[in-house]
Image (cartoon, coloured by chain):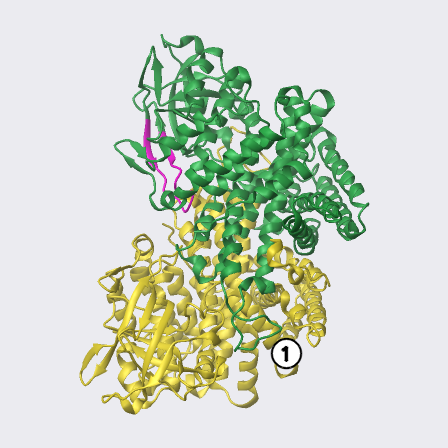
Chain colours: A yellow, B green
């Protein structure tokens, strides 16, 4: 088993040297925090990860959750872990003091999530699914609902979930058919009780025996409401509903648990509500506003998925790095004398290429994700234009921050497997597990195809392209900073050219939009890929500026370790521009082509 | 479970319409064959796949081989399956009549292998590992060895293996340390008996209970022989050795069975020979020629791995195609009225893109692999220049035919998973298994990195570049044929340009070779990728020519089905040029850059 699973040094580089996250404490909402409190949070995350989460990584993969007597049985240690997350205040850490939270910036919270996910992705999802569900409740629910449901959720005694998907409504949420009818419910009728009937599938942590109860934030359609997306409402549907001081069964049956390729430690449930007409759900907010509420939370969930993808990739990266440093095989290409001892494979250029690929993609993505988290903090804590701009830029970057790390995570974990060779394909090493786990991210919280449509069809054009203009301004400011460092000129020039390519492609596609929607959007996934590469190049230029400035100093606080660290950053930036950024030229060629082969293709010709 | 797992129509298109495999029957060695006998073989392969192999696909994945009392226990039905392959004459089908074989062309044999692998990859490897081992024995072994060992192998009663890898010798075979000392062996000493000591790891089908015995074709070092690659010899090392009419234990212990991410039905063993000084191996051929013998067989094994990769990818492709045709989700982008019923997802351009991606990569690769098989038949059956040229071109193309399908197979199976969305990540559908199985191919029979070095460092330069010149001539001839079809001009122009890019890159890299070996070879993996894309583009132009010519006919024998088939071919060709060929421009930009970032990177900077 690999020892290192993330780099605390790199995390602090992102937070303090690139982002300057301490600036957040200038906002009133975050004013009680400082660098010291941030570091305490990060240290605590590292410690709980090392001692509680990582030791279960393999065991949770080998012993899948099973449905036993109507309840899903998960790893027996999860109960104490989830409680520990509750007791240590992780579940409501970002929320206000008045709710028992710590008003912790999302930037720091997501940095902690990154650490948890790198230690054990499956274990890490339980508490933060509860956070997401609770966030919907506290934002839109009635005071009575909040009071009844959130305290046990914050304590890690109740699980929260998001219950969206149905057998006939996956990517197409507007086709949800779970129904809701007003019901009289003596104990909690002030909260708007409804009788719920329907099936939900793929519900993460939808039922398990490590908590006392589960609260589903469920989308359903109030009978008689409008068709399509406009008729969907949000309900809190507990597995057991509180009546007085007790809980009674709420007729939410677990029809099954899915067996999956990876991410096995977290149970994904198939649920049936109201099979015996006994399910009560409590309306959250106004009727017919369910999708709007859900999507307000979605940005955070999506940045979270991108972060999970980087977490898993990072654990795989360090596992393969450790192996490459220790495994002797072959001789250096410049001296193949067979009487020499074999060399560690990290001396082979192709192995270094596969390591640099992982490092460049993952640390570039981590930079983007923390930048997005920072934007969400500003959008939350600032006022006026600053608030609006941060929210708008975050909106634009969210599909990229979700999808680029998710898609690339399947490739970086694959590179980790490849470095280990035959060993990497066996269960003797953790990289094969990371490869299987990484594959979920391009699928859940919106597939990559959906995010391509979101970026090109919605985000690029919103407010007459103002979001894209904000991004351009940010990148321009980075380019200006880079101009102070002669060695960064080649990177700056390449990024400038890339930005031009992105502009040309965007203009070409927007030109199609008024007359031919299908052609406009048919390659949206490729557009997302191109957009992602340019964005990560920009993130690397930001990192390269800091690393170059630091390398130019005479006395680095961390001495030789620091010098090596910054040197690695500068090399990874070069790698990204040399090997990854160049991919945009093929993408642009295709995106500007007028051959509509995917549209013209017909089902019967396959 | 998906129904279709390959297309007999497409296989016949490749064999008869593109390759004109019947030409092979003009060679004396193949003269007893004709189209009818080829079709009988293919039909038999389809039938055995459908009835025996495919039904075990899931069960063999779920019930992994286990080591029980010193022997690996595999699926109980494998014994009858392997015997059936023996009885039906598959194991020695390519060999001469005098050996009981059928002198079946490799082209047809590999087409059958493709079908078996698409039905159940794990099950399909057992008989053909025996074929490979028997081929070494019959090519280089003494008559006595051949007589003692090959009949039960051909009958499917004994398993054959290739035992190369050791704990300290994976990619670096010259570091093999298994030792051999001459031994007196009264029963078979005429064959050159040696006492063998050493460990072998990752031995496919290295031990299992579906056969009566196992014969390892094992590399070992005769004590006192030269160091490095030049001192390695080849031995036949049975698990039980024949003494008179009985078999006695030969001290080859099974130390373990590897548990793997996929490809689980085939046991991969860790073996220990001579732990009790009781292992006898029989020298095959001359001393110190082991690597040379092994590499003569390697081309076939490597084309076989490429074929296995295409098999798995093809099964995944058809599973995702079936799903895409049946699964309703969302509405067509041009008419999103929510009161309309949902549309099958195959109407979404992005889904068609993912299907075309699979089709274009897989059918392009299948074309290349059958072309290589055809070359190996010509190299075997022809004389003079024709023989030499075919062998040389096959040598050049082998690393491409192994690696392109293997690397791309991880991506095509990933696209299949993506089309199924959440369902694809569960074990309810077979695509997740295909995704796990596909990951082995870039690793075994030489990693992709090794093949990159082989292509650029050895194959491109051999005989003063004559092999590359032969390929250019072949491609030129295809371009000439294409010039008769106006609609193919855009593709021909793009291929001509791509060939120019390949030439420029090759010249640039060869220019580095004399002065800087490390720089010359540091991006050999990328060169292999570029070379592969150009090669598959050429294969698609070959297919497009046939399909276009057929489409221009008034009366197609297969009527509307044929018309749809050829239409699909023409679209897939366009797809490949539009979406895949353009990737060479980014690759070329990197390959011609003089930034040596992977070489400059140091271990301690990661």
- Residue B99 drawn at (x, y percent): 51, 17
Q: Nearer the viewer, residue A413 or A129?
A: A129
Residue A208: image location, x then y, percent = 27, 66
Write the residue at 35% across / 17% down.
Answer: B241
In the image, residue B244 above or below residue A9: above
For this orientation, the residue located farthest to the left is A245
Q: Residue B600: x and y, percent?
A: 60, 49
Residue B299 seen: no
Q: Is residue A380 magenta?
A: no
Q: Tell whether A338 sits left or right of A115.
A: right
Which residue is more in the foreground, B207 or B38?
Answer: B38
Left or right of residue A262, residue A446 in this image: right
The image shows residue B22 at horizontal and vertical percentages of: 66, 30
For mark 1, what is the residue?
Answer: A461
Q: Quadrant of residue B511?
A: top right
Q: SS of the residue at dot 1?
A: loop
Compared to residue B467, the image places residue B350 above or below, namely: below
**Residue A374 versus residue B551: which sits nearer the camera?**
B551
* Residue extent of the magenta highlight: B253-271
Residue B144, image quadrant: top left
- Whether residue A201 is situated above or below residue A296 in the rendered picture: above
Q: Residue at x 63, y 65 (%)?
A: A523
Disc 1 crowd, CA 10 A, few/some/many (<14, 14-19, 20+): some
Name the chain letter of the residue that bears numbered label 1.
A
The part of the image, by quadrant, that contains residue B253 is top left
The residue located at (42%, 78%) in the rendering is: A105
> Would residue A473 be found to the left or right of residue B116 on screen?
right
Q: How many marks?
A: 1
Say if the magenta span includes residue B256.
yes
| Whether residue A603 is visible | yes
């Amino acid at each position: 088993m690999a020892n290192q699973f993330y780099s605390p040094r790199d995390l602090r580089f992102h937070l303090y040297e690139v982002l300057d996250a301490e600036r957040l404490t200038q906002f009133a909402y975050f004013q009680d925090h400082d660098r010291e409190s941030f570091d305490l949070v990060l240290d605590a995350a590292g410690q709980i990860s090392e001692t509680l989460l990582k030791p279960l990584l393999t065991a949770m993969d080998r012993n899948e959750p099973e449905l036993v007597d109507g309840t899903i049985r998960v790893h027996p240690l999860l109960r104490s872990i989830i409680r520990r997350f509750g007791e240590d205040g992780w579940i409501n850490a970002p929320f206000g003091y008045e709710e028992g939270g710590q008003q912790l910036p999302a930037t720091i919270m997501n940095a902690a999530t990154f650490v948890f996910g790198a230690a054990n992705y499956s274990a890490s999802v339980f508490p933060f699914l509860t956070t997401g569900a609770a966030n919907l409740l506290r934002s839109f629910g009635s005071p009575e609902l909040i009071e009844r449901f959130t305290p046990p959720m914050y304590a890690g005694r109740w699980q929260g979930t998001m219950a969206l998907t149905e057998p006939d409504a996956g990517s197409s949420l507007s086709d949800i058919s779970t129904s809701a009818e007003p019901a009289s419910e003596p104990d909690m009728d002030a909260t708007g009780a409804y009788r719920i009937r329907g099936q939900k599938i793929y519900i993460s942590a939808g039922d398990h025996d490590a908590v006392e109860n589960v609260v589903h934030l469920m989308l359903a359609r109030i009978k008689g409401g409008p068709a399509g997306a406009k008729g969907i409402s949000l309900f809190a549907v507990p597995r057991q509903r509180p009546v007085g001081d007790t809980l009674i069964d709420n007729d939410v049956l677990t029809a099954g648990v899915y067996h999956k390729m990876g991410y096995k430690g977290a149970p994904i449930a198939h649920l049936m509500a109201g099979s015996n007409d006994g399910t009560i759900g409590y309306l959250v907010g106004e009727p017919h506003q369910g999708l709007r509420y859900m999507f307000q939370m979605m940005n955070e969930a999506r940045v979270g998925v991108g972060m999970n993808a980087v977490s898993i990739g990072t654990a795989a990266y360090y596992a393969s790095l450790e192996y490459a440093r220790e495994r002797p095989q072959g001789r250096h290409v410049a001296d193949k004398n067979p009487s020499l001892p074999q060399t560690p494979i990290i001396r082979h250029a192709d192995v270094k290429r596969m390591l640099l690929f992982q490092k460049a993609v993952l640390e570039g993505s981590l930079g983007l994700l923390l930048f997005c988290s920072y934007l969400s903090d500003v959008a939350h804590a600032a006022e006026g234009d600053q608030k609006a701009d941060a929210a708008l830029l975050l909106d634009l970057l969210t599909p990229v921050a979700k999808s680029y790390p998710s898609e690339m995570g399947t490739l970086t974990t694959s590179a980790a497997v490849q470095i280990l060779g035959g060993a990497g394909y066996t269960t003797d090493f953790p990289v094969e597990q990371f490869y299987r786990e990484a594959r979920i991210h391009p699928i859940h919280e919106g597939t990559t195809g959906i995010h391509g449509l979101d970026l090109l069809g919605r985000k690029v054009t919103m407010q007459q392209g103002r979001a894209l203009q904000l991004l351009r301004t940010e990148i321009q400011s980075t380019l200006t900073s880079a101009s102070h460092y002669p060695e960064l000129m080649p990177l700056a020039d390449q990024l400038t050219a890339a930005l031009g390519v992105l502009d040309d492609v965007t203009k070409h596609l927007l030109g199609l939009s008024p007359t031919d929607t299908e052609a406009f959007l048919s390659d949206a996934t490729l557009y997302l890929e191109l957009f992602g590469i340019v964005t990560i190049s920009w993130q690397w230029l930001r990192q390269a500026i800091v690393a170059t400035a630091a390398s130019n100093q005479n006395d680095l606080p961390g001495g030789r370790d620091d010098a090596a660290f910054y040197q690695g950053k500068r090399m990874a930036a070069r790698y990204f521009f040399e090997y990854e950024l160049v991919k945009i030229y093929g993408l642009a060629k295709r995106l500007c082509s007028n051959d509509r082969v995917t549209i013209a293709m017909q089902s019967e010709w396959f």
